Image (tube, grey):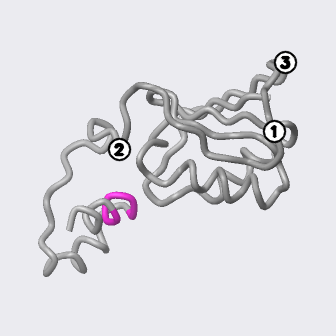
Amino acid sequence: MKIIVRGVVQGVGFRPTVHRIATSMGLRGWVRNNGSDVVIAVDDGAEELVRRLMAELPPLATIDSVEIIKSEHCDVETGFRIVPSTSGHKGVDSQRLGDVPRVSKGDVHAWRTTLPISIYKLHQLRG
């Protein structure tokens, strides 16, 4: 089975999260960045994997859509691994975040109470 995940899923720790969850479930397969999407191949358990991903998303990740392709054969070996990315845009899509004001370190507490958590964490990463 293949799972195609669209949204803010590149450069935000999504693949390591997929790896952690899939490994804990004992799944065989792989995950890779594919342009602006993430593709996951698993031998079984796609629906449960997606359910857990939705519940355990990294803080900066958002999922817009998920497509499960059940009829497609996937070359899966033993274990689960992160495979090299294919070409395409990588990282957080700044267009989706809109205009995010810069926050100085002294103002972080004030902004923490008003900004969504994902934007607050983005500011922490920017320093």
Residue 90 to residue 121: above or below: above
Kindly state the secondary structure of the residue where label 3 is placed: loop
Q: Which residue is mark 1?
A: 77
The tag on residue 92 is 2
Kindly state the secondary structure of the residue where label 2 is placed: loop
Distance (Cα) linking label 1 and label 3? 18 Å
Residue 107, image x, y percentages: 15, 77
- Image side of residue 97 versus residue 10, left or right: left
Q: Earlier in the sequence, mark 2 or mark 1?
A: 1
Residue 117, image x, y percentages: 39, 64
Residue at image point 76% right, 40% down: 29
The amino acid at mark 2 is Val
The amino acid at mark 1 is Glu
Distance (Cα) linking label 2 and label 1? 30 Å
Residue 36 to residue 50: above or below: above
Extent of the magenta region:
117-121
Q: Which residue is mark 3?
A: 71
Residue toward you, 99 or 10: 10
Distance (Cα) linking label 3 and label 2? 31 Å
The amino acid at mark 3 is Ser
Name the residue at the top extreme.
71
- Image side of residue 2 versus residue 112, left or right: right
Q: Quadrant of the N terminus?
A: top right
Residue at image point 51% right, 28% down: 34
Are the two marked residues, 3 and 2, in contact with CB atoms closer than 8 angstroms? no
Residue 40, image x, y percentages: 67, 36
Residue 95 lies in the magenta stretch: no
